[in-house]
Amino acid sequence: MSTPPFKSPLSFVPSDVYLRMMPKVRILKIAFFVSLAIAATSFALIYNSLNLNYQWKEKENILLEGWIGAPTLEKLALHLQQNSVDSILLLGWEYNLEDNNLEEIKEGDNSKTIKLIANSSLVIKPDKVDIQDTISEIEILLKGDSATSYFAHYSIFINQKLAESGFAKHKVRRLYKLNGVDLETITITFDNDTRTANADRNLEIISVNHNGEVLTPANANLYIHRSNFHKVGQYASNAAFVKQYCHDLGLDTSTFKTSVIELQENGKTIALARHFSSLLIHNKNLQKHAFYIFGESNHALRSLIAFRRASQNPKNIGVYVHPSNDNLKSDENILYKIEEVLNIIYLLLFFHV
């Protein structure tokens, strides 16, 4: 019985052409699966390296990114109490102080006591009063919760200028006066929300009085502004916030050297690394210093790669990371780590100073 002629499985490709293509198709399949295996292995290796905990304590300078959160800054305070450092280089970006994403509080909604349960600000714009040589007396009563040994942290801005910041250890009463200046805005920011198995920090704003009158939605415009790493309260920059928070933790911030750039919509770590490279180029003395990065656990690897690539001497850049308190099995954390792996892969492929 004669063997039937070979028929191409692809109707649009002639049989003789398909026979010539078969070795190339086989090579392409092998190349595809090899590439897939390499990609999967690389992804797994990077994913498992996110929780690095490399300590480089003998170095004398710390490199901070301005967008690290309050829980990490509290760990930094403990670290500095145990290890002396010569200086801290704090890199960040400027804020646009325009009010964005304000949520108005209607009359009848929490008109007396307002509790901030996540990082956010209460923005109050009192009704205008036409009085020459205005004298404004402002009284603010706050109450804070504690977690991980630290109380709720507040910052108070009068007319967009920082009046005071600190920790609300139970009840806090603050008084301010303005002479000959109209009171335009009062902003109270809560910026160190955290949740543990034993405690949840919140900041309760019991009352805000202006010349003896409690400010409510009936006689003022009240708004809530949700803050994040990109913008905290009405600070001029995230570097300014980090420095102020560390000051309130009792650290000597005279050793902090801050440097800020314009806010980047994307690639913020890359932008800060490029800025760091520029600082090194224009400051030869800085090139001699060894820095180690103090940062968030999952983000530390990306920072280490970026700043080592930006440095003239990569061996001078190390990293110090405290063990994370995060629940590594939570879906949210796993998704965050997958996103971080993709960011690192992009960094490895495309970032060049």
Image (cartoon, grey):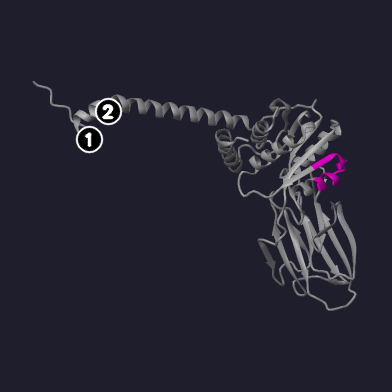
Contact, CB < 8 Å: mark 2 with mark 1?
A: yes
Quarter of the figure that contains the N terminus: top left
Q: Nearer the viewer, residue 239 or 250?
A: 239
Residue 101 x/y as whole percent? 65, 61
- Left or right: 47 as drawn, with respect to 38: right
Q: Nearer the viewer, residue 255 or 58?
A: 255
Disc 2 residue type (three-letter): Met
The single residue placed furthest to the top in the displayed view is: 1
Q: Residue at x 48, y 27 (%)?
A: 38
Q: Name the residue under label 1.
A: 13
C-alpha distance separating marks 2 and 1? 10 Å
- Left or right: 158 as drawn, with respect to 260: right
Q: Is residue 245 magenta?
A: yes
Quarter of the figure that contains the C terminus: top right
Residue 55 x/y as whole percent? 74, 27
In the image, residue 183 sits, relative to residue 293, either above or below, namely below
Q: Name the residue under label 2.
A: 21
Circle 2 SS class: helix
